[in-house]
């Protein structure tokens, strides 16, 4: 007798093995799906049952590492963060993220995205390298200043936004929502003084000027980041800078030393309240 | 010129178009309601009205400004569309030069037309 809690679902998978295939092809694999199973769980089951050579990237299984971005039923999503039940379909179509070259099966080549990301210097640029290398205290930043970039720092670089962007699809010179959003994240950080350095790249043809504001990047982001907003805010800052209207903010320094005396000695631990049996 | 500067001019031209196109709509289509900028007893599109506007320095300046803003805004948009077809570096340069030449030529022709109108409010008019 069939288990009433399971249902049959067909995984419609886009396969591409560079050693064998000249063009990508589609394969169907039927599996029994339990409640709570994610698309990533389904892929593992397909691999165990009928497609041992199926390749994809995944790691954390909890929407943190950004490895398992895929095109699932026509929408870029994280496989580990997508319940099969939420797709409301007996067919789960899985393909590699669009707008990237394919290495194998569901594995996109993210090299171009990370090369652009690196070009836009996604790190704090400061003069006090000695303090950065060997920090004595934390940098000063108010909660309000933190909020200006906090949501953009949730980006996990999964590439879903790049796959959804219609401009990335047609213009390979466009930097794309992830690198641009991260450039804005650091430009907005009060601990950073790298606006001028990043401006050199951002003012050119690959910068935010190609963005149509389609907003698809923000729609598909699995972490709720709004790269489209970041790009518009960055345009505003760059235009203000061009018109000499941008207010210069000095780079945040290190916080003051804590007030009050520290304990010279660590106090003794209180007596035990539980005795061993 | 860098894209940041070009885009800033594009937005500026859009704002100019917004104001001047609003003015155009008010003159050509709301004249009966507003009763401004037209000539006495004539429709805005009638010859007397057109000539009367051409003789006004305000309208001559407005025409040239609108022409420049609309040409720049449209040509920059066309450049963006052409660039999304992913041309090579040489073709991109040719597009830049070609569109700039077309823009300057059309602006010169349109400006001449505005200044050379019968009784235009300029030295060379008439």
Image (tube, coloured by chain):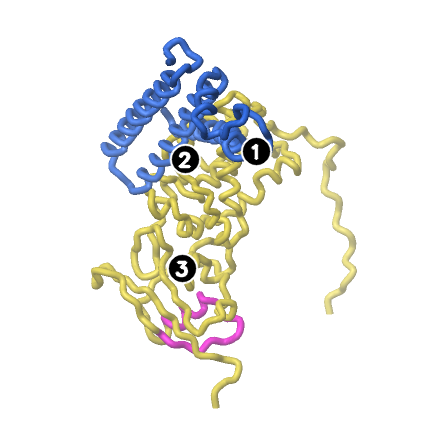
Chain colours: A yellow, B blue
Mark 2 residue element: loop
Q: Nearer the viewer, residue B23 or A106?
A: B23
Q: Residues within 10 Å of mark 3 (few under 14, many from 20)?
A: many
Numbered disc 3: what chain?
Answer: A
Q: Is residue A143 magenta?
A: no
The answer to whether any part of residue A130 appears in the image is no
Kindly indicate whether the residue at mark 1 contacts the one at mark 2 (C-beta within 8 angstroms): no
Mark 3 residue element: strand
Tell me the residue that label 2 is attached to: A207
- What residue lies at 51% left-to-right and 40% top-to-bottom? A230
The answer to whether any part of residue B35 appears in the image is yes
The answer to whether B59 is drawn above or below residue A78 in the figure is: above
Count the numbered circles shown.
Answer: 3
Work out whether disc 3 and disc 2 sit on a shared chain: yes
Work out whether disc 1 and disc 3 sit on a shared chain: no
Numbered disc 2: what chain?
Answer: A
Tell me the residue that label 3 is attached to: A71
Numbered disc 1: what chain?
Answer: B
Q: Which residues are magenta?
A: A29-47
Q: Nearer the viewer, residue B95 or B31?
A: B31
Point out residue A14 in the picture as x, y percentages from the top left corner.
32, 64
Point out residue B38 in the picture as x, y percentages from the top left corner.
53, 26
Tell me the residue that label 1 is attached to: B32
Q: Quadrant of residue A178?
A: top left
Work out whether disc 2 and disc 1 sit on a shared chain: no
Q: Nearer the viewer, residue A53 or B114?
A: B114
Q: Nearer the viewer, mark 2 or mark 1?
A: 1
Point out residue A74 in the picture as x, y percentages from the top left corner.
41, 61
The answer to whether A231 is drawn above or below residue B27 in the figure is: below
């Amino acid at each position: 007798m069939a288990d009433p809690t399971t249902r049959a679902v067909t995984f419609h998978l886009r396969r591409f093995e560079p050693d064998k295939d000249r063009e990508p092809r589609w394969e169907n694999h039927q599996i029994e799906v339990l409640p709570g199973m994610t698309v990533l769980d389904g892929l593992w089951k397909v691999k165990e049952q009928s497609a041992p050579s199926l390749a994809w990237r995944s790691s954390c299984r909890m929407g943190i590492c950004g490895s398992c971005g895929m095109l699932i039923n026509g929408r870029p999503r994280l496989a580990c963060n997508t319940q099969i039940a939420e797709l409301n379909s007996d067919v789960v179509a899985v393909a590699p993220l669009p707008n990237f070259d394919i290495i194998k099966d569901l594995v996109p080549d993210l090299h171009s995205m990370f090369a652009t990301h690196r070009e836009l210097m996604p790190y704090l640029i400061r003069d006090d390298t000695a303090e950065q290398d060997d920090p004595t205290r934390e940098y000063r930043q108010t909660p309000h200043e933190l909020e200006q970039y906090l949501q953009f720092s949730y980006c996990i670089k999964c590439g879903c936004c790049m796959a959804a962007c219609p401009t990335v699809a047609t213009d390979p010179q466009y930097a794309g929502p992830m690198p641009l959003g991260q450039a804005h994240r650091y430009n907005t950080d009060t601990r950073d003084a790298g606006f001028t350095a990043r401006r050199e790249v951002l003012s050119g043809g690959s910068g935010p000027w190609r963005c149509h504001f389609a907003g698809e990047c923000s729609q598909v982001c699995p972490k709720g980041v709004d790269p489209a907003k970041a790009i518009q805010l960055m345009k505003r800052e760059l235009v203000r800078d061009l018109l000499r209207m941008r207010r210069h903010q000095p780079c945040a320094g290190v916080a003051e030393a804590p007030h009050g005396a520290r304990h010279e000695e660590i106090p003794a631990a209180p007596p035990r309240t539980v005795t061993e049996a | 010129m860098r894209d940041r500067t070009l885009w800033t001019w594009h937005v500026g031209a859009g704002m100019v178009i917004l104001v001047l196109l609003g003015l155009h709509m008010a003159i050509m289509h709301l004249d009966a309601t507003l009763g401004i900028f037209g000539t006495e007893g004539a429709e805005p599109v009638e010859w007397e009205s057109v000539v009367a506007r051409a003789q006004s320095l305000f309208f001559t300046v407005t025409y040239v400004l609108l022409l420049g803003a609309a040409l720049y805004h449209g040509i920059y948009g066309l450049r963006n569309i052409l660039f999304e077809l992913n041309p090579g570096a040489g073709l991109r340069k040719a597009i830049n030069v070609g569109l700039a030449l077309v823009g300057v030529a059309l602006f010169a022709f349109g400006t001449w037309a505005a200044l050379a109108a019968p009784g235009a409010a300029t030295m060379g008019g008439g």
